[in-house]
Image: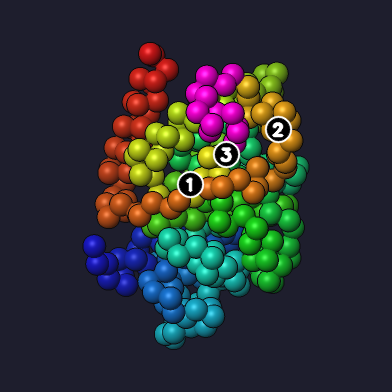
């Protein structure tokens, strides 16, 4: 569906309000963008609270981050470099969101990846979230640190910095940021209660199969999480961590190196919140049906 420049800028402002109101940023933190074509992007301005942006503040830039149109005093975010790296490496991505969700960022500061498979919805829609090495903001260090993870993941923690999520449209990128923080919160609470209990590998395979069945867009690193399961054994009772130890697979950086599922085409209605919510509800229903068998 065609959208005017004004509609795209308005959507960026709406996401800015959500991110600010959710406490995912403070003051002028965060930045996000939308790709129009290979040489045209809309990006949030630097030095402005994302909760108080107006459409006239959004910057239109080229593939090098230079303004394509004069925009008064507003300048594009200096961190747009890391967005460009994502767009270059992932043709399926059309929007990028960077924020500092408190609990997920705490995991990034502690050096703990979100790689424990504890929730069906997180497994289906997110997979796992690795940590990219620390880089100085606004330099090429962060884009370079992202590169090893872009083909396998749709969200990445930035060491001592925050999180980056991306998707086939702005809502999808935002929802992945929201899911990353929710995942981190659940893992944090579970550890306060004595430790998380991972879903067995056999059940993980069923969930990944559901993801394929529903054509969820993006990347997923879990197809070869447990070699036994993906040889056809859906009854494997090992946790993913136990499987990694048994088969000698590196578990650091959230299983980097596993073959990801192929990208799906972004649904044409993905920008419609109700349609995306319906998809989530339908997948959740299928998950519950599997568990109740």
Q: Horizontal and vertical percent for residue 94?
A: 42, 63
Reply above or below: 167 against 201. below
Q: Which residues are magenta?
A: 224-237
Q: Is residue 232 magenta?
A: yes
In terms of depth relative to the viewer, which is nearer, 141 or 239?
Answer: 239
Residue that numbered label 1 is attached to: 261
Q: Residues within 10 Å of mark 2 (few under 14, many from 20)?
A: few
Q: Main secondary structure of the magenta part?
A: loop
Q: Looking at the image, is mark 2 or mark 1 earlier in the sequence?
A: 2
Secondary structure beneath dot 2 equals helix
Classed neighbour count for the residue bearing mark 3: other residues with Cα under 10 Å, few (<14), some (14–19), many (≥20) = some
Regarding residue 29, the answer to whether it shows in the image is: yes
- Nearest the viewer among 286 and 18 is 286
Instruction: State which quadrant residue 215 falls in.
Output: top left
Residue at 32%, 72% (x, y): give it. Answer: 5
* Residue 43 or residue 142, whichever sits in front: 142
State the residue lying farthest toward the top. 293
Q: Is residue 290 above or below residue 217?
A: above
Q: Is residue 275 left or right of residue 79?
A: left
Q: What secondary structure is found at the residue carrying circle 1?
A: loop
Quarter of the image with the N terminus in it: bottom left
Q: Residue 287, position in %: x, y?
A: 40, 25
Instruction: For marks 3 and 1, give the CA distance.
Output: 10 Å
Q: CA gap, disc 2 to disc 1?
A: 21 Å
Q: Is residue 4 magenta?
A: no
Q: Is residue 44 left or right of residue 188?
A: left
Residue at image point 69% right, 26% down: 242
Give the crowd class for mark 1: few <14, some 14-19, many >=20 residues within 10 Å: many
Q: Quadrant of the C terminus?
A: top left
Instruction: In the rendered structure, find residue 247 and report the number of the disc placed on it.
Output: 2
Query: Residue 24's x, y, as percent?
Result: 55, 48
The residue that mark 3 highlights is 224
């Amino acid at each position: 569906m065609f959208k005017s420049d004004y509609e795209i800028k308005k959507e960026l402002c709406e996401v800015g309000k959500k991110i600010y109101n959710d406490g995912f940023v403070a003051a002028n933190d965060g930045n996000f963008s939308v790709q129009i074509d290979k040489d045209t992007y809309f990006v949030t301005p630097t030095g402005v609270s994302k909760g108080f942006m107006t459409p006239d503040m959004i910057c239109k830039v080229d593939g090098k981050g230079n303004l394509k149109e004069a925009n008064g005093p507003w300048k594009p975010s200096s961190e747009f470099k890391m967005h460009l790296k994502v767009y270059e490496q992932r043709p399926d991505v059309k929007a990028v969101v960077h924020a500092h969700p408190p609990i997920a960022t705490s995991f990034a500061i502690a050096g703990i990846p979100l790689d424990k498979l504890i929730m069906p919805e997180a497994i289906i829609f997110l997979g796992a979230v690795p940590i990219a090495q620390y880089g100085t903001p606004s330099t090429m260090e962060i884009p370079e640190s992202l590169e090893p993870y872009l083909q396998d993941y749709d969200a990445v923690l930035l060491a001592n910095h925050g999180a980056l999520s991306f998707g086939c449209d702005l809502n999808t990128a935002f929802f992945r940021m929201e899911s990353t923080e929710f995942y981190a919160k659940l893992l944090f609470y579970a550890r306060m209660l004595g430790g998380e209990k991972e879903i067995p590998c056999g059940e993980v395979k069923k969930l990944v199969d559901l993801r394929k069945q529903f054509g969820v867009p993006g990347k997923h690193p879990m197809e070869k999480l447990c070699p036994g399961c993906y040889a056809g054994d859906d009854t494997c009772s090992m946790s993913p961590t136990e499987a990694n130890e048994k088969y000698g697979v590196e578990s650091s950086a959230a299983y980097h190196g596993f073959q990801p599922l192929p990208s799906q085409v972004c649904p044409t209605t993905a920008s419609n919140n109700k349609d995306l919510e319906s998809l989530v509800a339908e997948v959740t229903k299928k998950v519950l049906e599997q568990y109740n068998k």
